[in-house]
Amino acid sequence: MSDNDKKQDTEIEKELAGVPEQFLDNGGDDSDDDGDQDTGENTGENTGESVVEALRAELEEARQQVLYAKADTQNVRRRLEKDIADARAYAATGFARDILSVADNLTRALDAVPEDMREHSKLEGLVAGIEATQRELDKVFGQHGITRIASKGLPLDPNQHQAMMEIPSNEVEPGTVVQEMQPGYMIKDRLLRPAMVAVSKKPD
């Protein structure tokens, strides 16, 4: 290399001092440099798309969790509302079941008085008092949704009737209630006490 060439190289090096190396053309293939640069850009784009997709997936998962939480909260609220409504509607169940024995005793007391004696001067006041007490008790039952179960002459309903005995009969279909031994009661749509009944069967 001549002295002029060395001097020229020295001057070029001084001019290029401080220039970042990636901007220097080292005489390599331009196409390779462009290819490397494109690959870098594509890699960046792919990485950005991956991040966006991941964020979308996380967002969708969070949205689903929020929906599930809302649904669970709604179900809990409805169950609580139903429990509160049931508690109010059937609050008197225990007391009503206990007071049924009072109604039974009033009925027994009235049935114990013969028909021909009910207008007797000594018993007339007693009978009137028992009947008035029965009416008042029935009124209170009605105010709390307590109703008497219909039995006699109806087919046996195991959800409301408890069969205690069978009576042979040709007058009604087998399985028909022919006698009520103890009245049954409902409190709204729930069974308070089944009616104890006798049902018909075919004679032997």
Image (cartoon, rainbow, N blue to C red):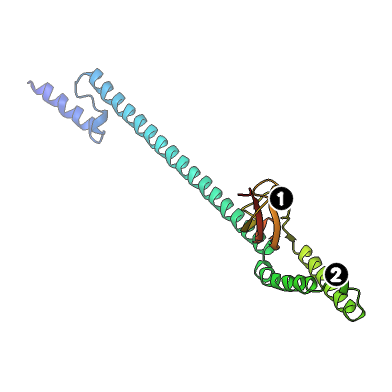
Q: Earlier in the sequence, mark 1 or mark 2?
A: 2
Above or below, 174 against 145 in this view is above
Q: Please tell me which residue lies in front, 32 or 55.
A: 55
Give coordinates of residue 110: x percent, y percent.
80, 72
Q: Secondary structure at mark 2?
A: helix
Q: Please tell me which residue lies in front, 180 or 31.
A: 180
Residue at 34% from the left image edge and 33% from the top image edge? 47
Give coordinates of residue 98: x percent, y percent.
67, 72
**Dot 2 corresponds to which residue?**
115
Q: Secondary structure at mark 1?
A: loop
Q: Is residue 171 left or right of residue 41?
A: right
Res 101 seen here = yes
Q: Please tell me which residue lies in front, 131 or 22.
A: 131
Res 187 seen here = no
How many residues crowd around disc 1 within 10 Å: few (fewer than 14), some, or many (20 or more)? some
Give coordinates of residue 70: x percent, y percent.
55, 49
Residue 203 badge? none
Q: Quadrant of residue 94?
A: bottom right
Residue at 72% from the left image edge and 57% from the top image edge? 149
How many residues crowd around disc 2 within 10 Å: few (fewer than 14), some, or many (20 or more)? few
Q: Amino acid at mark 1?
A: Leu
Residue at 9% from the left image edge and 23% from the top image edge? 3
